[in-house]
Amino acid sequence: MAGSSSIKGFMDACPIAVVTRSIIIENVATVKLKSRGILYYILWWCRLPALSSLSQVQVSKLMDPRPLSVPPTSSAATVRKIMRETGARVILVTHEARLLGWVPRRLALLVTTRKTTATARDIMEEPPVVLSPGETVASALESMLRVDEWYAPVVDGGVLAGLLGLEHVIAEHLRLNPGHLAGIRVDEVMSRDPLTVGPDDFIASIWRIMVERKYAGLPVVDEKGRLVGIITQYDLLRKGYARVELTSEAGQHRGPRVREAMTYTVHYLYPWSSLEEAARLVAEKGYGRIPIVEDESSRRLVGIVDREDIVRAVMGW
């Protein structure tokens, strides 16, 4: 556990574990070293109140009722501009309030030139998941995570009603259950040994990974594995890169490198940090993923926590 203060906050949010309060708070080391099975048993049952409080909530209660949308005749350049200016991860395409498709950042990166004549209709795709307002959050999340999507439009009778994102679920969980995630360390849920890139890698190769594997961002490390930044789809859009500038690595002009577009100031956490900290960075700062470093002195990357990891912990999956 992260420490007695985290445990106290966790226990306050967990009525089931009150009977063991004196054991956990007064003898943290004993529980951690000698009664680990009991501790995990308590942790598991303490997740049930949070699960029940969110699982049956209707999607309409959490969704954004006014998501960003454009008509199908809007230019692809306009879609990219909106994404750059707002930071939106997805733009919906509608006609007379009816959903026609959507353009996630991944597709915006496929635009072949800055002066393209393509329209939103030309680059949009059908959303993998479409929800209804009366659907439960548990059902919605199962559908979204099954296809590795962080967002899903909500449609009522063919008319766009809103957009549900994983961050909406995380924010609501923090509101309803403050302190619940304080007793979970990030290294319990993080992905270990994540794919990384270097500052001198060509963006052409990074762009290809983002498009083909649907990676929204990648940590940037130096030759010693020390975290030095992060490169995201938004960074590429912010710099105005178009597909024609990124598709070729061959020849004399191999294009821009990661160091020319990466974000150097990156918020990171430690293996012992609480999942509550990661969840608040997602809900309050809009982060999609948080790198995890070994310690402050080495800053060696050991893992990454993203929105899906947090949602699975919230729901007890």
Image (spheres, rainbow, N blue to C red):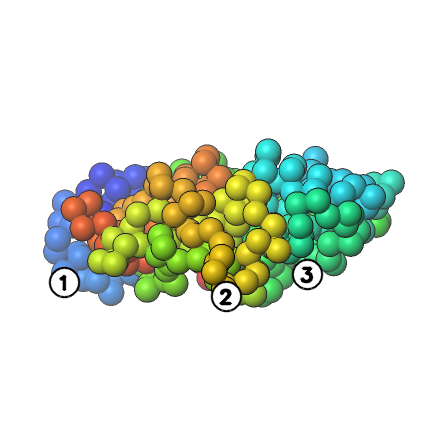
Q: Give the residue number, with chain letter if any, for mark 1.
A: 34
How far apart, in angstroms, are the residues tagged by discs 1 and 2?
58 Å
Q: Is mark 2 on a helix, strand or loop?
A: loop
Is 95 above or below relative to 226? above
Task: For marks 1 and 2, give the one nearer the viewer.
Answer: 2
Task: For marks 1 and 3, give the one nearer the viewer.
Answer: 3
Task: For marks 3 and 2, give the one nearer the viewer.
Answer: 2
Q: Are marks 1 and 3 in contact (CB under 8 Å)?
A: no
Total numbered labels: 3
Residue at 57% in and 53% down: 245
Q: Which of 108 and 192 is in front in this view?
A: 108
Circle number at residue 182: none
Q: What element carries label 3?
A: loop
Mark 3 Cα-neighbour bin, 10 Å: few <14, some 14–19, many ≥20: some
Taking 117 as reference, is 293 left or right? left
Residue at 71% in and 51% down: 102
Name the amino acid, label 2.
Ala
Q: Which of 203 and 120 is in front in this view?
A: 203
Q: Give the residue number, with chain letter if any, for mark 2.
A: 250
Residue at 70% in and 35% down: 66
How far apart, in angstroms, are the residues tagged by discs 3 and 2?
35 Å
Q: Is mark 1 on a helix, strand or loop?
A: helix
Residue 93 place in picture, x, y as percent: 76, 46
How far apart, in angstroms, are the residues tagged by discs 1 and 3?
47 Å
Mark 2 Cα-neighbour bin, 10 Å: few <14, some 14–19, many ≥20: few
Name the amino acid, label 3.
Pro
Residue 122 place in picture, x, y as percent: 78, 54
Q: Give the residue number, with chain letter if any, for mark 3.
A: 128
Residue 149 place in picture, x, y as percent: 59, 57
Taking 286 as reference, is 277 left or right? left
Name the amino acid, label 1.
Lys
